[in-house]
Image (tube, rainbow, N blue to C red):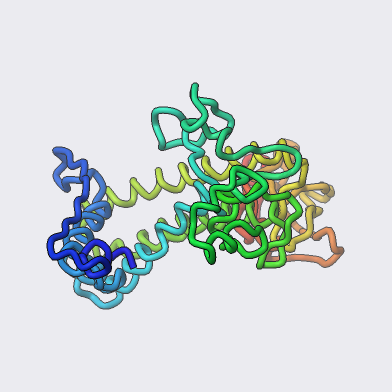
Amino acid sequence: MVGDIVDGTAQHHPDTAIVGVANLGNADNLTGHHFSQANLFAFGRQAWDWTLDSADIATDWVRMTWSNDRRVVHTIRKMMMGSWEALVSYQTPLGIGHQFAEGAHYRPDPADWAGRDDWSPVYYNKADSVGLGFDRSPTGSNLAAQYFPRLRQRYGDIDSVPENLLMWFHHVPWGHRMDSGRTFWDELVYRYQMGVQYVTWMRETWDALQPDIDARRFAEVRAKLAVHEADAADWRDTSVNYWKEFSGRDIPVDNAPLSATIVVNGRKFGGFNLSEASYPIPVPAGASPTITAVRTATGRRATRSSPRRPACPGGRSSRSPRRASSARW
């Protein structure tokens, strides 16, 4: 364990130290984001006792910061405990590294070459028609050889490397079969989408806590989550659309039909790809924009909802609109 090294146990050192770098500003809440304070709190707690459980630390922080109400504590802690993995999913899923824009590290730019290889997203992603990822296996740079034999063997084999390190050690073929049964391409898109959907869930969950949080802090966190959701979607869309240029594969959907037919004002409109966010529907002046029927590509009639939400960029809620708004569907 890293903790055993830091506290001196592993190598029998009587004196040890741990250092954390924190960029605090002049914001009232020190970090500029109310939830970023939790990182400082956790560092302080673990500096004294690294064996503490992260969920227990989060519980203590929530109780001291937001509320002692059991429901509020449980809800906010759940938001926090999945947030890191969500960020990994929409920024650097499956072990791909450093896909950030030069000089910022806040927005995606997988096509960028920053003047030297080790600063550049293209150096790390190695995207081509075969696959994606940096080959550090024995057939590539052989970085895996620097590890102890057991890990060297595990990391150097594409079939045994942990999936969260997959693209760090291997140039993964687009059709490689994943643990989920999906192809690598489908799994990659799925991971991006799941990261975004977690942020959406956090935003919606926070909205439900409005009666329990003071107005100022509720509004400030709500605004941050709205930006967070937009940024996550930008990471997903920019990344997936760039990888698609190399994979040549369609954006997958979540086991749903690829198109549907709707009836508006007695006229059929079809061929809709459910991955798209909207479609223009011409409606004569004075005519009703009501969608009177929805039929999926399977031929089954849907009167209340369209096929399940596509797990892909631009996906929308599974519930179909009851009316065609602004001549769009």
Residue positioned 49% across, 61% down in the render = 148
Between residue 316 and residue 135, name the one nearer to us: 135
Determine which quarter of the picture holds residue 132: top right
Between residue 272 and residue 327, name the one nearer to us: 272
Q: Quadrant of the N terminus?
A: bottom left
Q: Residue 100 placed where, x, y %? A: 47, 36
Q: Residue 193 placed where, x, y %? A: 58, 54
User: Would residue 283 be seen by someone viewing this image from the given angle?
Assistant: no
Q: Residue 236 placed where, x, y %? A: 56, 45
Residue positioned 21% across, 68% down in the render = 12
| Vertical order, 253 against 78 (above or below) | above
| Vertical order, 137 against 53 (above or below) | above
Q: Residue 48 placed where, x, y %? A: 15, 66
The residue sitting at the top extreme is 115
| Vertical order, 2 against 270 (above or below) | below
Residue positioned 82% across, 50% down in the render = 266
The residue sitting at the bottom extreme is 70
